[in-house]
Amino acid sequence: MSTFYLNIVHRPEMVPEYIQKEAEQGKVEDLRRYSVLQESLDIFRTQQQIAHENGLRTTIQMTYASLFNAEAVAIAKEHHEQFGDEIGSTFLGLQCAEFREKFKSKELAIWLFAMEDKRKIVDEVFGKFYEVFGFYPTSTGSYYMDAELVNYIKEKYPMVKAAVATCWEEGPKAYWNANNSWYTLMDGGPWNPWIPSKRNIHCIASDEADDIGIVAIPHLSRDLMAVFDGPGSYYGTHPQNILRGMVYENREIPYFKNIVDQYRAMVKYNRGYAYNMMYVGPGWMSKGGRWEADYAFLLKSYKDGMAYYGELKQQGLLQDLTMSEFADVYRQNRPYTRPECTLWKDILYGSQRQMFWYADPDMRFCLDMNQGGAMVDLRPYAAKLVRPCGVGTKANQDASYPFLVQSLYRAGFFTHYAGEGSVKSCKIGVGSEQVDLCACRTQASFSEEGDTRIVTLGPVTIEFDGFSARVQSIFRLTEGSGEVEIVRRILDSTNPDADFSLDEYITACYGTTEYPEDLTGVRLTLVAADKTESIEYAYRCREAEAENVQFVEAIIPPVDTRLTMRADGPAAGYFREGFSFSPMYTLGIKKIVKAKGELRTWLKVAKAS
């Protein structure tokens, strides 16, 4: 039976962004200003009322500031008893007079504090929560919660079972969109709930020993195409995000329903399970309006969004759970190896474009059908990198999980000048002619065979001098293998005698932003039946190739990753070293076939150490 689960998370944020706005307008900052506190409470109460009028329960995540407000506490208790809402705790909304006095800091984000201060803040917030409610929360959250922070919470407060742990794709694109002032990067995590690794919150746990002990959920359910291409704060299940992105017409937001329906459709790819979340504070519903929207439109958009969830529940198509209830449901009969995947279609521009997203304990990747099924993003979860963030760490603000391939930060198929961008694709050649499948748009379908998920791309026709050929690509993903099996097949040709070269390649690097990292120390290796060649990366344009290849691989020490390609039979293999103007490396496997021939390769991501 298919089930669509929903988490609605509200927080009484007592000192939202109005304070900064008023300070900018010449008023002295006053964290206890009554008018601000009362408006925030009114909006929080309104948001709760809208949810309840639509028959929906919420998780109320109390901010630290709200724990000092008797009215906010009373609302939470009342709604817990009357509607069954869950009372949880959030590390958003830390800033208030009490926090300033105790911690002497204007820092907004708990993950950016030094670890010693993170522990103190957790103990202070949870201690105050217990003082107010007489119990500890079983759910918590922030925009991001690093593994070191969650490990401490789980050790000290084992009753916690769920957390809002990251924003999906809040990386350099969000930073650019915020006028280069969003000094926190958290790119590279799952878009759907996951059980995180003890070593890195972005990574999916491999087994019970690696299980951090909570179920993590993302901050909002985002548009998996629009957010990949642009800023996440425009496209998600938050009506006021949609207003910020101006994705509406005549004060209606059908795009919100489209996103929700895309998530509902994930039952087709995830064994009958789908999920959605909304996570909001009162700052978005300012009586003075936000962005170009007036208060009446802000209110209407929120009512319209909640009404759609309410309709789905009334029709028996949605199950609203609190965060802790969802955590219990998610863990039922769920092997650690089970992936999250989805075939997402464009719902913003009306094109036929599709992207396939996949995440399991070994990797997260994305295929773009507008580029012939090219892999445009690849994150090596198998490495389970320990990358603490915050003051006193090397990362500080950069909490992103590194990529090996990221076509937007590293050029992808198209490069402005010399060299190559990061992408995984295949080139089809005849004689001196060669076409990259990146240049061939297609569509995909999804199917399953036991524990193997299959993405089958529609055939593309490639025109050569005097004849044409149809080529099909198939991606097979066997649960627990840590490999992507890729089939490139010449279905037919108007010249049956033609010899086709199939060149399966991956051009990669590593990083978290658009700026290049030092590839010195990366080792490229080719192992063939009669020889082995290996080099240490030194930006010298070196290449190696051999027939009867067994495998080609790159070991990338800075991200503790081993990236390997192998074929199912006789084939040539190669590696290429880049240069400073094109700081990449390429691994490839080639084979000559005639019509109806194929090349079958496997890409494996593993921990190097």
Image: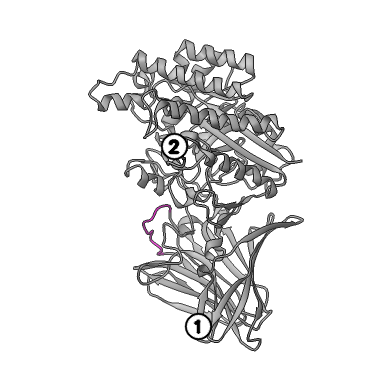
Decide if residue 100 is on the left or right side of residue 555: left
**What colour-coding does the image apply?**
one colour
Question: Counting other residues with Cα less than 10 Å from the Cα at mark 1, is it few (<14), some (14-19), or many (20 or more)?
Answer: few
In this rendering, is residue 238 above or below 465? above
Decide if residue 433 is on the left or right side of residue 471: left
Q: Which residues are magenta?
A: 512-520
In this rendering, is residue 207 above or below 161? below
Q: Which residue is mark 2?
A: 243
Q: Would you say residue 385 sits in the magenta stretch?
A: no
User: Who is closer to the viewer here, 607 or 320?
Assistant: 320
Q: CA distance from mark 2 to mark 1?
A: 48 Å
Q: Secondary structure at mark 2?
A: helix
Question: Counting other residues with Cα less than 10 Å from the Cα at mark 2, is it few (<14), some (14-19), or many (20 or more)?
Answer: many
Residue found 64% across the figure and 19% down from its top: 84
- Horizontal and vertical percent position of residue 228: 48, 51
User: Who is closer to the viewer here, 58 or 62?
Assistant: 58
Quadrant the N terminus occupies? top right
Decide if residue 47 is on the left or right side of residue 512: right
> Magenta region's main secondary structure?
loop
Amino acid identity at mark 2? Leu
Quadrant the C terminus occupies? bottom right
Can you name the residue that lies furthest to the bottom here? 497
Q: Which residue is mark 1?
A: 433
Residue 86 shows in the view: no
Residue 522 shows in the view: yes
